[in-house]
Amino acid sequence: MKTKITKVVALFTTLAIIFSCTEDMEYRDTAVSPVNQLYEPISGKSVELVASATASLFFEWEAAKAEDSGSPLYEIVFDKEGGNFSNPLYKVLSDNNGARNYATISHKTLNKIGAAAGLNSGETGTIIWTVIASRGLSTAMSNVSHKLTITRMLGFAEVPSQLFLTGEATEGGSDISQAVPCSSPEQETFEIFTRLKGGKSYKLVDKTNDNANYFYIDGNRIVEGEGETTVEKDGIYRITMDFSIASVSIQEVKSVGVFFCPSNKVIFELSYKGNGIFEGEGKVTFKQESWGKDQRYKLLMSYSDKDMYWGTLNDVDSSPNGAGQEDSYYFIKEYGINEGSEPQWNHKWKFDNQFDGSMTKVTVKFNGANYTHFVSLGDGVSPEEPETTPKNLFLTGEASEGGNDISKAMQYNKLGEGIFEIFTRLQGGKTYKMASSQEADAKFFYIEDGEIKSGDGITTVEKDGIYRIKVDFSNKSVITKEIKSMGLWHCWDRNVLLDLPYIGNGVFEGTGTISPSNNDNRYKLLMVYADDSELIWGTKNDTDVVPGANPDPSYFYIMETNDNAEAGQWERKWKFNDGIIGNNTKVRVIFTGENYTHSIEPVN
């Protein structure tokens, strides 16, 4: 009997514990307080909406409080004047996906809200707004609302269902049946990437026959009628037309390239082929890391005034795994060049393994329902690595002193078999390459990750500057160093007496009065790199005499020494001739030819 009673007590005790636990672990949602004050815009504010992509209105309110001390989320809700928000016209998350107690709402969105409130284009009316705070499943609507008076933009009451470009300036010419179709990335908006001829006219039509309705662009506005529009020069243009606010944005596209994330640069560019399609090919080499090979990439588009990335629409983080040309894996979306915490890596795709070390073709399509791209094996032959060392080497390209004209390419100095060096000015962000000759049939080379590659690859430096570039074909290595300054260095004073600016073609030259302490006539040359490291250039033939009236040219030959400005004060120096100290003097340092040299002479 005692055993039975004990078991019954134990059973009730267990059930009590279970029910207690169930009660303790029951989900209880976190309460959130309503917003008590609305700050901006003040109630009764009037706003005339404008057709600009950057026009916006700032909303702000007092922060709500959550029972668990967490951060609430917020929605702004709009309604007609006299409404109670039970069936709101529109809802907008606050900034940072609802996390902020403020929001920046575009005029375009406010224009849509005005339309939902029954306001016609250009009409003025009043709407009301308040804020809903939420935490988990709990929500609290503010008991305060503000009035906002808006004047809607002069958009189109009837928006065409499709839009085309036609006219002499367009890819389809003046034949309306060949008009070029626009894409429609969102409702009431049309967009086109297309080639236009400068000085010739184009217009917009909603059909490709004689029954078409005509529109034209006047400044940044769309106007109905048979007017005509021109661009100043030939080019590839992106034209975005928003009929809801009758606004237009026109951007010239300067280039589109394949941006390889591990290298943080464009590895090859895409040419415009027509009908909104860009295509190009180049060699892709994955970057070997300790954890494996890095194969991440996206696209970089350069407009006339800014750069923008085009990355994955769906933020995938895998290889395509057999995805076809129409697969959403390849869909693209535009992002800011500095968007996110890691803009170099955000919104990227991964090349399939088959493209490592291969000529690869990338096709980008800015047409149709979804902007997209596709990657395939290239039609060309993969560039071979240098098998033979060129006898001579030249620098050419937009970034170089000689420009793109290969006949004006700058010649490297030959230091030995397969070893070349050049001192030259380069323009930042522009491209250059190396050539085996100044002829049209020259073999080309480029630099990638500090290594020489053969072919028409792209090489750039980040900023304008004077550079020393040393190339060694025996191990395919390249050393590039930016030069900050060059000067005449006095041994006794241990400082620069005369700055020697770069004047072009490997020459540094300066003119001024040389007035050393103690009238000491010993000097060398000091080069300072951009990292502030210093390099002394001294006499190649180690002399301890003045040059005299008719010196041997070899007296002025220079060589790089192991000394810097803090050591080797007296070794490998030259001496000024009489008449140099205290007088106006020109000093020239020449980094060209078989022997680097310099000259120093009085100036009348």
Image: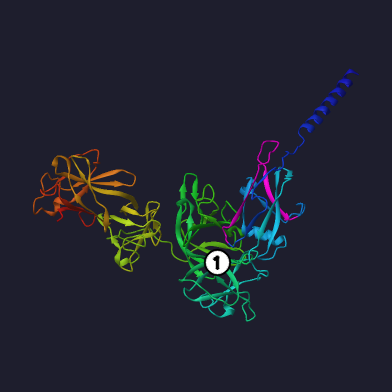
Q: Position of residue 592 (x, y in %)?
A: 23, 56
- 295 magenta-colored: no
Give the residue furthest to the right. 1
Q: Is residue 424 above or below residue 21?
A: below
Magenta residues span 52-81
Q: Position of residue 143 (x, y in %)?
A: 74, 45
Q: Quadrant of the C terminus?
A: bottom left
Name the quadrant containing residue 424: bottom left
Q: Position of residue 467 (x, y in %)?
A: 32, 53
Name the quadrant containing residue 383: bottom left
Q: Is residue 350 left or right of residue 419?
A: right
From the viewer's side, name the closer residue of 452 and 37. Answer: 37
Q: What residue do we see at 36% from left, 57% from top?
A: 427
From the viewer's side, name the closer residue of 69 and 282. Answer: 69
Q: Is residue 246 above or below residue 501?
A: below
Return the residue at label 1. 220
Q: Is residue 494 left or right of residue 35?
A: left
From the viewer's side, name the closer residue of 254 and 67. Answer: 67
Q: What residue do we see at 13% from left, 54% from top?
A: 553
Q: Position of residue 332 (x, y in %)?
A: 57, 59
Amino acid at the residue labelled 1: Asn
- 61 magenta-colored: yes
Colour logic: rainbow
Q: Secondary structure at mark 1?
A: loop
Q: Is residue 491 visible?
A: yes
Q: Quadrant of the N terminus?
A: top right
Q: Residues within 10 Å of mark 1 (few under 14, many from 20)?
A: some
